Image (cartoon, rainbow, N blue to C red):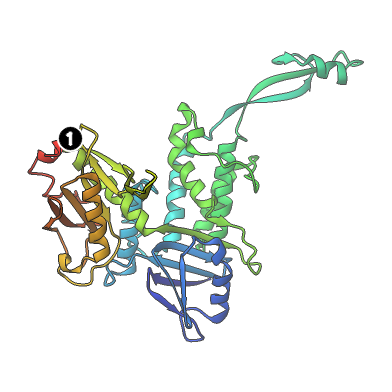
């Protein structure tokens, strides 16, 4: 299988001497309809993935790995580590970064890292045994088990009184959750290019002998379907769903089977920042809220609200009032002076937030990058003075601090 490495927003050249051949580009174009909307941008003899990172695989012929753009000087292994840590902290794939020392910093491709993590989680749970659940069973027996089904008995055994139509509960392993896990194993067996991984998967499948699979159109079990005794399977069930729900697409685009495991970096960075900031907010007595509170910028002549506003992150005080509005930006600044690199659109947006929510603290959060570490602030003179803080967020497990939130406790009451 041909493997191609790309950087988000980085062009891949198409041609006999390029990153992709013309036929490979045609296959990618045919698969575009089943990829996230707006994922690709085409140019003359070139194509790029926009704000998405992850993996796209077309049959067993082509695999494209898309890595984060923030540190272009990093090695591919370091870029994988960055993405893995963000997915772990944001909660998309929990516990993934614990394997980075043995996986992400080696020669393993990103998809194989995800597959190995799933196998490790599943193996830990299988050591305690497959999940079992009671299922209603109907059978004809020589002696009573459970209760006799009188209707079936009269219909089927009217002249065979020695045979009894019984209905009873039996503890079985062929249950929806196990079928989901078995289906995920079949899915990743087709995806991996590693013979060692494929052998490991086949060994795991032997544990699922006699268990069916999820058919197209069937309901996909989720972690909410697990009872209290089955809760230990939560992480592995969610990862199994990630492999086969929406990402595994049997798309007949020129008879090409397409698999995509892509993450919108704008959304991932927002969730990542919220996860790192939540304990900071809790420590100073504030409540963090994502994507809200919603409020209209104004009303028209009929009194109908217009221009619905929805901040990325808000810090709410005990009076249920937003006292700090934060906007996340997954982008590289043009210069090494963040305040002079801010776009007018971003400033207009934050000014509207400050005015609408009557908030005196607003923040822009960017990923930490070359030439920008820590934070800088300025005062915006609007209806009243508003403090704008521009923060570089470290993309790792290090503790996140914002000095503008720490020393002053006045913002807790919104003073």
Q: Is any atom of residue 98 visible in this view? A: no
Q: Which residue is mark 1?
A: 285
Horizontal side of residue 62 vs 370, given as left or right: right
* Position in image of residue 376 (x %, y %): 12, 59
The picture quadrant where one finds residue 208 is: top right
Horizontal side of residue 357 vs 192, given as left or right: left
128 or 49: which is nearer to us?
49
14 or 232: which is nearer to us?
14
* Position in image of residue 146 (x %, y %): 69, 15
Horizontal side of residue 12 vs 173, given as left or right: left
Q: Residue furthest bottom?
A: 17
Say which residue appears at 13% left-offset and 41% top-offset: 411
Q: Is any atom of residue 384 visible in this view? A: yes
Horizontal side of residue 37 vs 291, given as left or right: right
* Position in image of residue 348 (x %, y %): 25, 59
Q: Residues within 10 Å of mark 1 (few under 14, many from 20)?
A: some
* Position in image of residue 307 (x %, y %): 36, 51
From what the image shows, is residue 221 above or below residue 334? above
Say which residue appears at 20% left-offset and 37% top-offset: 286
Q: Quadrant of the C terminus?
A: top left
295 or 365: which is nearer to us?
295
Say which residue appears at 89% left-offset and 16% top-offset: 160
The picture quadrant where one finds residue 329 is: bottom left
Q: Residue furthest left?
A: 407
């Amino acid at each position: 299988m041909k493997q191609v490495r790309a950087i988000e927003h980085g062009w891949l050249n198409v041609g006999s001497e390029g990153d992709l051949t013309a036929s490979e580009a045609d296959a990618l174009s045919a698969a575009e309809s089943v990829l996230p909307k707006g994922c690709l941008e085409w140019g003359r003899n070139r194509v790029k993935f926009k704000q998405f990172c992850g993996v796209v695989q077309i049959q067993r012929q082509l695999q494209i790995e898309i890595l984060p753009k923030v540190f272009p000087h990093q090695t591919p292994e370091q870029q994988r580590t960055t993405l893995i840590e963000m997915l772990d902290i944001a909660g998309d794939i929990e516990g993934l970064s614990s394997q980075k020392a043995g996986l992400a910093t080696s020669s393993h491709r990103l998809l194989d890292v995800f597959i190995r993590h799933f196998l490790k989680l599943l193996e830990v749970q299988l050591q305690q045994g497959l999940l079992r659940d009671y299922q209603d069973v109907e059978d004809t027996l020589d002696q009573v088990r459970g209760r006799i089904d009188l209707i079936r008995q009269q219909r089927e055994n009217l002249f065979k009184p020695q045979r009894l139509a019984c209905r009873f509960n039996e503890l079985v392993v062929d249950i929806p959750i196990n079928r989901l896990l078995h289906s995920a194993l079949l899915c990743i067996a087709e995806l991996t290019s590693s013979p060692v991984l494929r052998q490991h998967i086949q060994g795991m499948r032997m544990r699922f002998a006699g268990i069916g699979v999820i058919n197209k159109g069937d309901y996909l079990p989720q972690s909410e379907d697990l009872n209290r005794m089955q809760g230990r399977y939560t992480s592995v069930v969610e990862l199994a769903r990630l492999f086969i729900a929406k990402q595994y697409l049997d798309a007949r685009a020129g008879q090409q089977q397409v698999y995509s495991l892509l993450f919108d970096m704008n959304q991932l960075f927002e969730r990542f920042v919220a996860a790192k900031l939540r304990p900071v907010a809790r420590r100073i007595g504030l409540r963090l809220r994502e994507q809200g509170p919603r409020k209209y910028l104004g009303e028209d002549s009929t009194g109908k609200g217009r221009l619905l506003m929805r901040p990325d992150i808000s810090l709410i005080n005990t009076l249920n009032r937003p006292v700090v509005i934060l906007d996340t930006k997954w982008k590289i600044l043009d210069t090494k002076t963040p305040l002079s690199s801010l776009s007018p659109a971003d400033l207009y947006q934050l000014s509207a937030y400050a005015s609408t929510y009557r908030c005196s603290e607003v923040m822009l959060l960017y990923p930490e990058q070359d030439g920008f570490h820590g934070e800088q602030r300025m005062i915006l003179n609007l209806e009243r003075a508003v403090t704008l803080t521009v923060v570089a967020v470290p993309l790792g497990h290090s503790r996140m601090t914002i000095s503008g939130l720490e020393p002053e406790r006045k913002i807790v009451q919104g003073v």
